[in-house]
Amino acid sequence: MLIFFLSLADEQYRPQIERLFRRYHNKMLRVARQGFARAKHHNPALDAEDAVQSTFLSIVRYANSVPFGKPEHEIKAYLFTILHHEITKIIEEPELPSQDGVEDTIDIESLSDFAEKIDIRDQYAEVVTAIRDMDPKYSSVLLLCYGEEMTVKQAAEVLGISPNTVYTRLRRGKQQLIEKFAKEGE
């Protein structure tokens, strides 16, 4: 994820955005998962991923108004305020029914470490190539949701598939990338 955020950010803000991501990403995921679990939301793990991703997309989009020069506690409060708003937006959206009643399990630790396992400077082009070389059903949702900043619902409408299918393809596509780069790292 981080590589996508950095590729979208103005060059002058990339170091600060990377520092925020590396410092707070995992904690934000935990906070979001807890918030969705307390709200008894349908899929806390996937919704937490969406909330954190939306938060960082907002940081990238409005980097010129982020208080990077302020004390750390103010930056942290700013970041978690945005996260709270993203969580609230997702909770207030109507729940999507499961297509077949079977919950897909997701390895959150692998996904949260996804960006950490890819060396941003050396492997950005390799990641983009890997995504483009994937089965189009996976690459299209990855590119729409992360590259074009579409929501799952928007991507589903563009592709003519259900939002549940988009969630599944995102999870499977990320898992394929994790496995590909894990094999290459051995």
Image (tube, helix red, strand yellow):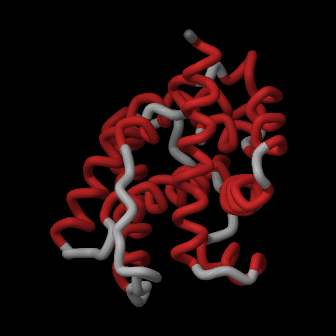
Q: Is residue 150 visible?
A: yes
Give percent across and percent down for residue 122. 75, 16
Give percent across and percent down for residue 149. 69, 62
Taking the spot 67% from the left edge, 80% from the top edge, the residue there is 161
148 to 67, vertically: above or below: below
Q: Nearer the viewer, residue 29 or 172?
A: 172
- Tell me the quarter of the image containing the C terminus: top right
Give percent across and percent down for residue 91. 34, 78
1 to 170, vertically: above or below: above
Taking the spot 37% from the left edge, 68% from the top edge, the residue there is 87
Please tell me how many numbered marks the rendered image carries: 0
Q: With 18 as the anchor, is 143 left or right in this view?
A: right
Q: With 19 as the anchor, is 152 left or right in this view?
A: right
- Tell me the quarter of the image containing the N terminus: top right
35 to 15, vertically: above or below: below
Give percent across and percent down for residue 114. 51, 34
Taking the spot 83% from the left edge, 41% from the top edge, the residue there is 133
Q: With 182 as the anchor, is 14 left or right in this view?
A: right
Q: Nearer the viewer, residue 46 or 97?
A: 97
Q: Nearer the viewer, residue 179 or 93?
A: 179
Q: Is residue 82 visible?
A: no
Q: Residue furthest left?
A: 38
Taking the spot 49% from the left edge, 36% from the top edge, the residue there is 21
Q: Quadrant of residue 52?
A: bottom left
53 to 14, vertically: above or below: below
Q: Quadrant of residue 132?
A: top right
Q: Residue furthest top?
A: 186
